[in-house]
Image (cartoon, rainbow, N blue to C red):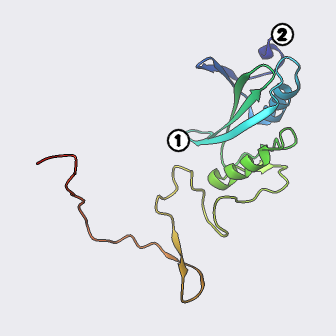
Amino acid sequence: MNILKIFPFIKLEVYNNEYCFVVKTNLLSKALFLFKNHFKYQFKVLTCISGVDYPNNHYRFTLVYELLSIRFNSRIRVKCFVNELIPVASVRDIFLGAAWWECEIWDMFGVFFSNHPNLVRLLTDYGFEGYPLRKDFPLSGFYESRYSHSKHRVVYGDIELCQEYRTFEFPSPWEKN
């Protein structure tokens, strides 16, 4: 039985003998459920969820779900395309480990996952504004944080990037002049 005959995937891509299925966002959870529970596939382990930002595309973000079948010793990827306005259905009910990766993608890219029980920021600080892995995020950030010994707490201030121009020309011990 061919999976392409029983499920409406958009496209099948093959890289280094590994399959990558592209699916519509609204069918993502059904596709992952099928791959996990169908007796011919049995991809029981979700090894990773990744996000990629393509700011010039209509669907700015690509979400990649990587699955592992221990029984058949094989891996596949399932991709979907979203933008900032499209929520993605959480797949935590299918793979429990997805909750952590969905929180990371929310924290780093700002992709919202509907029906997620506890969508929180994991890697950035409280009150952090923006999403650091977006291509349009400023490289220097907005504020710097440091520990103040006089106030005995962490203080925040505006970024100050001025310093003298320095050249680093040290003699190399491996080169003879």
Residue depicted at 77% across the width and 16% down the height = 4
> Where is mark 1, residue-wise?
56
**Disc nearer the start of the sequence (2/1):** 2
Name the kind of residue labelled 2 in the image: Met
Q: Residue furthest top?
A: 1
* Vertical arrangement, residue 91 with respect to residue 34, above or below: below
Q: Nearer the viewer, residue 98 or 167?
A: 167
Q: Nearer the viewer, residue 149 or 21?
A: 149
Q: Secondary structure at mark 2?
A: loop
Mark 2 surroundings within 10 Å by alpha-carbon count, few (fewer than 14), some (14 through 19), many (20 or more): few
Tell me where residue 147 appears, x and y as whole percent. 55, 78
Q: Nearer the viewer, residue 89 or 125?
A: 125
Q: CA distance from mark 2 to mark 1?
A: 38 Å
> Where is mark 2, residue-wise?
1
Name the kind of residue labelled 1 in the image: Asn
Tell me where residue 148 appears, x and y as whole percent. 54, 83
* Badge count: 2
Tell me where residue 18 appears, x and y as whole percent. 65, 21
Residue depicted at 69% across the width and 58% down the height = 122
